[in-house]
Amino acid sequence: MKQITRLIGAVVISFGLMSAVTAPLSAAEYFGTVEPNDILKMLNDNGYKDAFVADTDYEDLPVLNFTLADSKAVIYFYECGKTGKVCEYLQLRVGRVMVGQPNYKVVNDFNAEEQFSQAYIDDENRAVIEQWITLEGGISDVNFIYTVITFGETVEKFERIIGGEN
């Protein structure tokens, strides 16, 4: 009987510790639905002071520009519903004009090693690197900014590999 009591006590303590470990951090602000203005505010509030709405796309959604890894970065929004505001996806994108003939093998080798971003040579001879982010179900400001920082590190690596002019 004592063994069963100890076993039940151990199980209760284990579940208590597991729930404490998996509890979400309260420091992050969570956005259940994400609008382009939320993304702009997250960028501005986290040191990307040059982020601004540069234009609108063919669906009249804002296109954001900002500097990332000394390059001009763009954010495009997708699946923004009938209101044109609450969006399901966004794309981080940086394009570089290639000097000389593009080296497709270098780009392919880069893609083979990357987990989250993809690179390609577009029809205007630009080396492009992009990353998609899902916003379905929401996102925290901390998660978004860490994603942007990681993408910036990937852009720096890509630019070292391909060279070129911005």
Image (cartoon, helix red, strand yellow):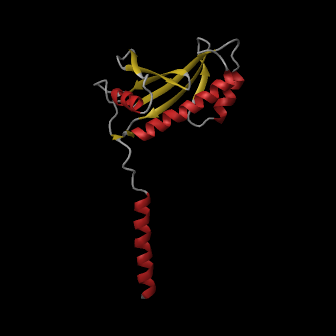
Residue 44: percent from left, percent from top: 40, 28
Residue 153: percent from left, percent from top: 58, 32
Could one spot residue 36 in this view of the protein?
yes
Q: Relative to 125, is 18 on the left or the right?
A: left
Identify which residue is drawn at 62% across, 35% down: 114
Q: Relative to 95, is 57 on the left or the right?
A: left
Instruction: Name the quadrant containing residue 32.
Output: top left
Identify which residue is drawn at 56% across, 19% down: 95
Does 17 appear above or below 110?
below
Residue 163: percent from left, percent from top: 67, 20
Instruction: Name the quadrant containing residue 97.
Output: top right
Identify which residue is drawn at 38% across, 37% down: 136
Total count of labels: 0
Residue that sits furthest to the left in the current view: 83
Q: Quadrant of the C terminus?
A: top right
Q: Quadrant of the N terminus?
A: bottom left
Could one spot residue 56 in this view of the protein?
no
Identify which residue is drawn at 39% across, 52% down: 24
Does 63 appear above or below 140?
above
Instruction: Name the quadrant containing residue 31.
Output: top left
Does 73 appear above or below 136?
above
Residue 96: percent from left, percent from top: 59, 17
